[in-house]
């Protein structure tokens, strides 16, 4: 793991993506591989590695270097990150599901402990719109 140097007022928020559990309906709609895109705060979108849709474990950690100012604290309190599930084949890809994740617990008394959770990803197109298509485990 590479060493990260922080300036005064900065911190690191680590988000670890774990296993994803896809419904049979989702598996019908998936092409060759899947990946996750994380949209959070003012950061560029983060893209996970590609994995096969069956027995998938992303097992990847993203580090966000954050300025712990009032704007960021408000983001933690009131906003959420968006986790988007994409399917791809060759150079073609499309979003099939998404879910919102709150990091609000970071500013409570549990903020010093690692938090493990799961997010339901709901379909965003076609017959799967609004239907739960996957559960994604994550830690932060």
Image (cartoon, helix red, strand yellow):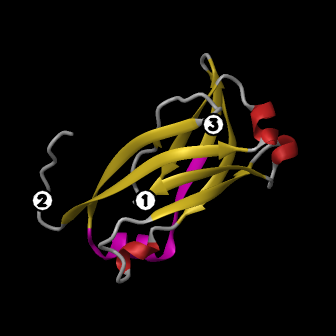
Residue at 59% from the left image edge and 44% from the top image edge = 20
Q: Secondary structure at mark 3?
A: strand
Task: Give the labeled residue for mark 3.
Answer: 86
Q: Which mark is residue 101?
A: none
Q: Is residue 7 left or right of residue 20?
A: left
Task: Give the labeled residue for mark 2.
Answer: 7
In what quadrant of the picture does the C terminus appear?
bottom left
- How far is disc 2 from disc 3 in space, using C-alphas? 35 Å
Q: Depth-wise, is mark 2 or mark 3 nearer the camera?
A: 3
Q: Is residue 81 left or right of residue 106?
A: right
Q: Earlier in the sequence, mark 2 or mark 3?
A: 2
Q: Earlier in the sequence, mark 1 or mark 3?
A: 1
Residue 99 position, x and y percent, is: 63, 56
Magenta stretch contains residue 75: yes
Residue at 26% from the left image edge and 69% from the top image edge = 68
Q: Secondary structure at mark 2?
A: loop
Residue at 57% from the left image edge and 59% from the top image edge = 118
Work out whether 24 lies above or below 100. above
Task: Give the labeled residue for mark 1.
Answer: 41
Residue 25 position, x and y percent, is: 82, 40
Q: Closer to the camera, 123 or 140? A: 140
Residue extending furthest bottom? 109
């Amino acid at each position: 793991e590479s060493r990260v140097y922080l300036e005064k007022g900065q911190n690191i928020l680590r988000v670890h993506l774990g296993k994803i559990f896809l419904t049979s309906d989702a598996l019908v709609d998936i092409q060759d591989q899947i990946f996750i895109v994380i949209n959070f705060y003012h950061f560029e979108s983060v893209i996970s590695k590609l994995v096969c849709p069956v027995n998938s474990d992303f097992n990847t950690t993203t580090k966000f270097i954050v300025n712990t100012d009032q704007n960021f604290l408000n983001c933690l309190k009131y906003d959420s990150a968006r986790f988007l599930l994409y399917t791809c084949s060759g150079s073609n890809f499309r979003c099939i599901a998404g879910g919102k994740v709150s990091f609000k617990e970071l500013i409570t008394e549990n903020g010093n402990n690692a938090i493990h959770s799961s997010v339901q990803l709901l379909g965003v197109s076609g017959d799967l719109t609004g239907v739960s298509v996957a559960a994604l485990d994550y830690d932060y």
